[in-house]
Image (cartoon, coloured by chain):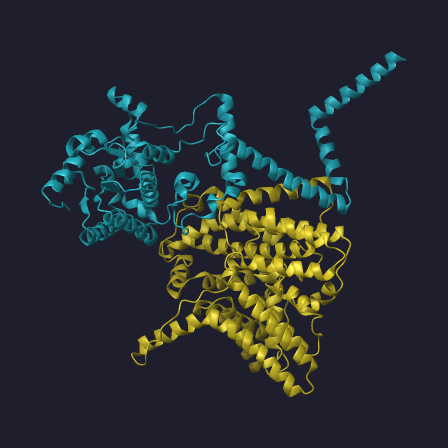
Chain colours: A cyan, B yellow
Amino acid sequence: MRLQVQNKLKMFFECQTIELLCGRGIMRFIDALCKKSISSKSYCIACAFMFYGSLLAIGLLNFVVDPLSYFGTKLFAPSIQLTRNVKADGIAKAPPGTSLILGSSRVLKIEPNYLSEVTGDHFYNAGVNYGKPEDFYALLNHYQSIHQSLPRKVIIGLDVVAFNASLQVENELLSSRTLARYLPTHIATSSNSPFNHLFGLQKTRLSLACIKRAITGRAPIDIQNFRDDGVIVYQSRESQRKTSTYDFSSALQSSIDEYEHHFRDYERICPNRWNLFVESIEMLRSNGCDVVVFLTPDHPDLRSRLSCCPNYNSRSSDLHDMVTKLSSDTGVKYFNLQSIDHFGGDVTEFIDGIHPLEQNTRRLVRKMLKSEEDDDVIQ
Amino acid sequence: MLFNSYAFILIFLPLILLAWYGLGRWANIRLLFLVVGSFVFYGWAKWEFTILLAVSTLIDYYVGLRIYTANSKRIRASWLMISLTTNLGLLGYFKYCGFLLTSYNSLVEFLHTGYMIYVPDIVLPVGISFYTFQTLSYSIDIFRGQVAPAKSLLHFAAYVSMFPQLIAGPIVRYQDIESQLNSLSRQIDWDVLQKGVWFFAIGMSQKILIADSLAAQITPLLSSPESLQFITGWYSLLGYTAQLYFDFAGYSNMAIGLGYFLGFHFPPNFNSPYKATSIQDFWRRWHITLSTFLRDYLYIPLGGNRTSKLIVIRNLFIVMALGGLWHGAGWNFVLWGVYHGLLLAMYSIYQCQNKIRLPRIFAVSVTFFFVMLGWLLFRSTDLSMALQWLVAIMGLNQIESSALSVLPTFAVSILALALAICFLLPNANECKPNQSVATTIVLVALLVICVMRFDVESPFLYFQF
């Protein structure tokens, strides 16, 4: 009897296994799900529970993982390096009266030590990736909030592309609780709301990526190293340059592709961003700060490729005219250093099409400071 | 407040529903809660707008009572005039004042004579076109003896301000909802609630998953119309045609779904308009509540079909031009309305002279083509953009080598999916999904994905009207 039962059970499970392997079990399961009708009441209650339950689970996941360090749970490493938070911390730690370098990643090789040697002032490089006027505004306000004063001197590297309205405010800035609070309301959009960080699709993807990296033990892909003075260290790329194994052509081509895309729909200088930039300048000047503004240089090959794009020449010219006028209205020193000829730059001292290395940034500084000493604005 | 916002889904809607069914025994308190909640919903972005809504509600309630109790037709007509003047006056000031003054100034500049007038910067209150038409229909229906005044100001305020349909329709007539307002069910009707889940989920998916995905592809193309070429021109046109439908139909379905959540049945607003076999059929399927409003309150009083052919054509032009103007304060909207008037007039003449029934596919294709051309006018910000777009679709501004060389695969796929849904699948009203576990899971999954996509701001296209 027992043997019979055992044999029957064995046959039953074998059949089920075969069916599952053949997919019939799954098909039957799906068939049962589709055909089994439930009452309207069960349907509605099930929908409500499943819906809000799923959202609760997603919210918990994003809160615990906190991929952009919005909630401060710090249980997982953030999914991307939050350069803005790094620079905000750097500003907070800098002694009062520290002068600032502001701009995008293109200013990240301007050395505060070199500036200190030349000017005698203490500098901190507060450049941030894809830095735009809203970043400068937030960082300056943060500086003022921490030190109850503004920097003695500010050097701002302006990218022409930073005034393209189709480039969104960086998520990193909106997610930074330290800096986002300073943003004007028309910029601090609802995308920075806690709900967004709890339930947003992008944030959920980042959370899952954080968990995956935590499980596999891999570091975030785009981690960058900064020195204490804010200068970036291109670890792998600089060591490849030293050993002459760096593929500069590919890096240059990436810059070309990126900037051709940026300038394709760049029809006019964004008025909101320009107004915010002017507001920052006026805030600095009204507090007696020395301000030097320069247009950041492009690699000659990049310039020659972009010069075929009408928007590149038009927007560069527009920004140059606007900053020139601002300079004469506010007393700000201005230098158009888009071409390396304007500062005696070295074509080999770029890491790609847009990021100058130390030799070129020193030349930039010498050009600006030499002109500053002689009170002679270079165009 | 938007339906596709976290505040609505996570806070407002659960609170409203809990209170609505929790206060089951007390009908008046439920209605009061609904009115207050609706005003909060409306005033969420700008509280000043609620004053206009309140004023319009009070005036039309009072006027409705006076019309009903008036002894003579002359007095009734006078009170109706007050309602018309107030509602159209509000609409005229907030929506058309700037447009009219700008047009006048352009004319003065063109003719080099007369004085320019200062154009004030007037903010258009969201939904004003919808709720003014709604309150107008109430006054007119009382005047015509088709409906009695609302039981109380509370009932009327609930009708006007009900949040599901307040901002972008459907335009609900008081007679559609009177009996429902007067006899609120104490019990939860789970069958109706289940319908609400269906419509809300489908509407949300239409808006977030399809309309917004299309918008992401075509908005950059249309931001520089001079760069449009043949394929990108046609893609933008087809894409906008689909986007507008899914955006507006999605909102309407959500509104209907929310109405069901509260136990109210709203009239359908779309019935697969792109399957229309004629332009007349199209207007029976697109924005149904608006077209029936225009028919009942404008076209028929002008004489409708019961006059000479010339007068019918005149009526069609007037109604469609005003219908176009209702959509937006701009000459492109007027032109779009006149264009549809012309199509309707031509169809009316064709109908008289031809009794041949065209093959369905041919009729649908031709109708769709002409409707799509109309959307070109509708979407263009000015005439020069319309001309540039037209030049592009005619192939006069270069023809690209292939679609996939200029458009990402996703862009082509989402458009193909959208058009397949428009032409091949039944709409939300026609579908009767089974109440299975699988359907539940699918609908909830769709809703959750949509909610997660709220991290990108996406207002509804029809909010600008």
Q: Position of residue A214 (x, y in %)?
A: 49, 24
Q: Position of residue A158 (x, y in %)?
A: 26, 43
Is B421 on the left or on the right of B120, as rendered? right
The quadrant where residue A255 appears: top left
In this rendering, the answer to whether A200 lies above or below A184 is above
- Residue at (90% x, 13% y) in the render: A1
Q: Position of residue B299 (x, y in %)?
A: 60, 76
The residue lying toward the viewer, choosing from B349 and B329, is B329
Is B316 on the left or on the right of A30, as rendered? left
Residue A61 seen from this side: yes
The residue lying toward the viewer, choosing from A68 and A150, is A150
Q: Position of residue B211 (x, y in %)?
A: 53, 51
The quadrant where residue B153 appears: bottom right
Which residue in the rendered view is the most extreme toward the right? A1
The quadrant where residue B423 appears: bottom right
Which residue in the rendered view is the most extreme toward the top? A3
Is B388 on the left or on the right of A334, as rendered? right
Count the labels in the image: 0
Looking at the rendering, in which quadrant would you find the N terminus of chain B? bottom right
In this rendering, the answer to whether B231 lies above or below A30 is below
The residue lying toward the viewer, choosing from A326 and B189, is A326
In this rendering, the answer to whether B251 lies above or below B82 is above
Residue A354 seen from this side: no
Is A132 on the left or on the right of A39, as rendered? left
